[in-house]
Image (cartoon, grey):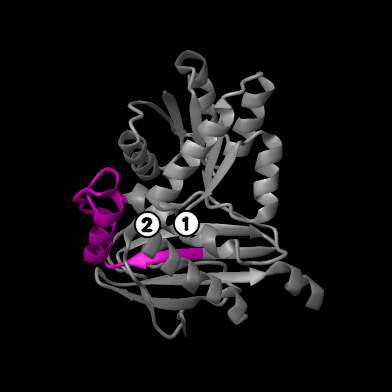
């Protein structure tokens, strides 16, 4: 995958967490995600369509997610709380939206978010798409952004 | 001052509600999508609307177009992740008075609210 499609997600995740939570995020070296590699325990998922399509996942260990959601909502929240998934969904919505705004000259739409909660769950994106894992570190703990997207315009041009 | 918040995320509505409360606006109604908002605007008659773009059932842009077609002139601020210039232009053409891109700080949203109300009162 072209790194021009990864950098927007790095910038966006830092911007969202610093603006909404005053929480600095350190980005580590992105890696290729193995197909059978599990995500963490709590994942927000957004679909992208248009000139760029695929899936974006924001995934956290439970403890990290609970700390982050508590800061975001201003209330103590556990993963059992009624509004916990809503908050995770809004975070992945802002990260994806902020990244897509950096795709210049591309028309991209994002779906409404879905949230999966469960220990070491696996998320399978489109079979023919490489998934890049962006590890993130914060004072609330580690988490990651998984990006499995492609530029359809470029794909059609080379077909 | 009556404010209608239209966003499918309860978290986002709560954040906006907190900012509005600090500004002294206590009469706040909530809607979870465009359809829900349309069902509430008649009885509630808001003085200001904060509207998200990406929502299920009826998105924010469709809601704005429908609301304006009803002859309603109440100021609307679009609060959304849709940051592309093309989208902003589309929203303004549809009848949105101001625009806030998520993520936002409380100061930014407060300023846009004050600015919008001052502009529409003039």
Q: Is residue A115 visible?
A: yes
State which mark lies toward you, 1 or 2.
Answer: 2
How many dots with numbers?
Answer: 2
Residue shown at 71%/68% (left/top)?
Answer: A152
Is residue A68 positioned above or below A40 on the image?
above
Numbered range of the magenta stretch: A56-84
Q: Nearer the viewer, residue B95 or B114?
A: B114
Q: Mark 2, chain letter?
A: A
Q: Mark 1, chain letter?
A: A
Is residue A23 positioned above or below B29 on the image?
below
> Which of the labelled discs sits on residue A94, or is there none?
1
Which quadrant holds the N terminus of chain B?
A: top left
Q: Report, in whole angstroms, how far the alpha carbon at label 1 lies from the one at label 2.
A: 10 Å
Residue shown at 47%/13% (left/top)?
Answer: B43
Q: Dot 1: few (<14), some (14–19), or many (≥20) neighbours within 10 Å?
A: many
Percent coordinates x, y for residue A44 in the rendering: 41, 58
Percent coordinates x, y for residue A50 in the rendering: 68, 58
Residue shown at 26%/56% (left/top)?
Answer: A71
Percent coordinates x, y for residue B45 in the rendering: 49, 17
Q: Nearer the viewer, residue B2 or B13?
A: B2
Q: Which residue is mark 2?
A: A20
Is residue A119 positioned above or below B18 on the image?
below
* Left or right of B43 in this view: B65: right
Which quadrant holds the C terminus of chain B?
A: top right
| Same-subunit check for callouts 1 and 2 | yes
Percent coordinates x, y for residue B82 in the rendering: 58, 52
Mark sitting earlier along the chain (1/2): 2
> Which of the labelled discs sits on residue B51, or is there none?
none
């Amino acid at each position: 995958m072209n790194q021009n499609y990864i950098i927007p997600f790095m910038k966006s995740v830092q911007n969202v967490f610093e603006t909404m939570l005053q929480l600095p995020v350190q980005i580590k070296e992105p890696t290729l995600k193995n197909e059978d590699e599990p995500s963490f325990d709590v994942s927000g998922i957004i679909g992208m369509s248009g000139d760029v399509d695929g899936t974006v996942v924001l995934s956290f260990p439970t403890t990290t997610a609970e700390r982050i959601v508590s800061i975001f909502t201003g209330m103590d929240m556990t993963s059992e709380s009624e509004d916990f998934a809503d908050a995770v969904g809004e975070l992945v919505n802002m990260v994806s939206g902020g990244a897509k705004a950096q795709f210049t000259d591309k028309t991209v739409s994002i779906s409404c978010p879905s949230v999966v909660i469960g220990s070491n769950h696996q998320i399978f994106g489109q079979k023919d798409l490489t998934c890049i894992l962006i590890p993130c570190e914060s004072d609330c703990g580690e988490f990651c952004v998984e990006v499995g997207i492609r530029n359809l315009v470029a794909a059609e041009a080379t077909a | 001052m009556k404010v209608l918040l239209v966003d499918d995320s309860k978290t986002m509505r709560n954040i906006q509600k907190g900012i509005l409360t600090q500004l002294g606006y206590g009469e706040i109604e909530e809607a979870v999508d465009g359809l829900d908002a349309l069902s509430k605007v008649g009885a509630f008659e808001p003085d200001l609307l904060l509207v998200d773009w990406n929502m299920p059932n009826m998105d924010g842009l469709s809601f704005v177009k429908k609301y304006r077609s009803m002859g309603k002139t109440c100021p609307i601020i679009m609060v959304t992740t849709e940051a592309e210039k093309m989208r902003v232009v589309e929203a303004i053409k549809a009848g949105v008075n101001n625009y806030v891109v998520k993520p936002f700080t409380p100061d930014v949203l407060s300023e846009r609210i004050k600015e919008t109300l001052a502009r529409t009162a003039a």
